[in-house]
Image (cartoon, grey):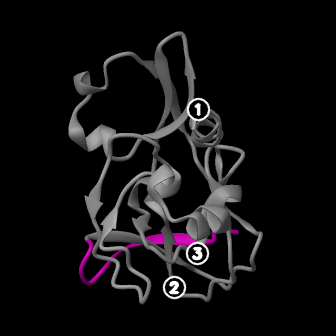
């Protein structure tokens, strides 16, 4: 049974919304798409780079999934209701009601050289979204189970350097 649909939002363009009640821990979306190794990210157009999903790094290349719909329409929230599991699955990290927008914390997807002004309007909005290593220790602890293997490996490597 289909769990989500893509709809227009009032302020953020398109978004992904729950078609039914979804329980915490339930798989919502399989992140499908072509897997590519990239040496020079700037060779790819911005509209592709803003949606790809880093999963690994090998021989100087970053490995990305070039995702297909509906993944590419999931908006950010500083209080997300989904997270990544096993690099390819989005799971509910809390109960989601039918009609709620599906949101992920973009900081769980990236680790270096990235920021974005936040417009999520949640009560705990950080105003600027950055990378996982820039999150507060409290937010890192809360979200660490829901980041890609790539971010986990890079983050742990950076911790060992400190």
Magenta span contains residue 160: no
| Quadrant in the picture for the C terminus | top right
| Residue 71 shows in this picture | no
Magenta span contains residue 8: yes
| Residue 126 shows in this picture | yes
Q: Is residue 133 left or right of residue 51?
A: right
Question: Of label 3 and label 1, which has the lower sequence position?
Answer: 3
Mark 1 sits on what residue?
Answer: 161
| Quadrant in the picture for the N terminus | bottom right
**What's drawn in magenta, residue-wise?**
1-12
Q: Nearer the viewer, mark 2 or mark 3?
A: 3
Question: Of label 1 and label 2, which has the lower sequence position?
Answer: 2
- Callout 3 environment at 10 Å: few (<14), some (14 to 19), or many (20+)? many
Q: Is residue 85 left or right of residue 42?
A: right
Rounded to the nearest angstrom, the CA distance separating label 1 from label 2 is: 41 Å
Q: Which mark is residue 4?
A: none
Q: Nearer the viewer, residue 162 or 119?
A: 162
- Callout 1 environment at 10 Å: few (<14), some (14 to 19), or many (20+)? few
Mark 3 sits on what residue?
Answer: 81
Secondary structure beneath label 3: loop
Rounded to the nearest angstrom, the CA distance separating label 3 from label 1 is: 32 Å
How far from the left and from the top, in percent, is residue 140? 59, 61
Q: Nearer the viewer, mark 1 or mark 2?
A: 1
């Amino acid at each position: 049974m289909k769990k989500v649909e893509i709809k227009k939002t009032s302020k953020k363009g398109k978004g992904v919304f729950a078609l039914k009640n979804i329980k915490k821990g339930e798989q919502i979306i399989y992140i499908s798409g072509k897997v590519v190794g990239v040496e020079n990210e700037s060779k790819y157009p911005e509209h592709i780079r803003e949606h790809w999903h880093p999963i690994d790094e090998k021989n100087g290349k970053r490995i990305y999934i070039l995702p297909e719909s509906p993944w590419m329409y999931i908006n950010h929230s500083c209080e997300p209701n989904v997270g990544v599991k096993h690099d390819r699955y989005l799971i509910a990290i809390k109960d989601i009601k039918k009609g709620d927008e599906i949101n992920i914390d973009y900081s769980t997807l990236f680790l270096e050289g990235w920021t974005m002004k936040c417009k999520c309007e949640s009560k705990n909005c950080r105003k600027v979204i950055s990378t996982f290593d820039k999150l507060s220790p409290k937010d890192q602890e809360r979200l660490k189970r829901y980041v890609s293997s790539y971010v986990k490996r890079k983050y742990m490597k950076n911790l060992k350097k400190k």
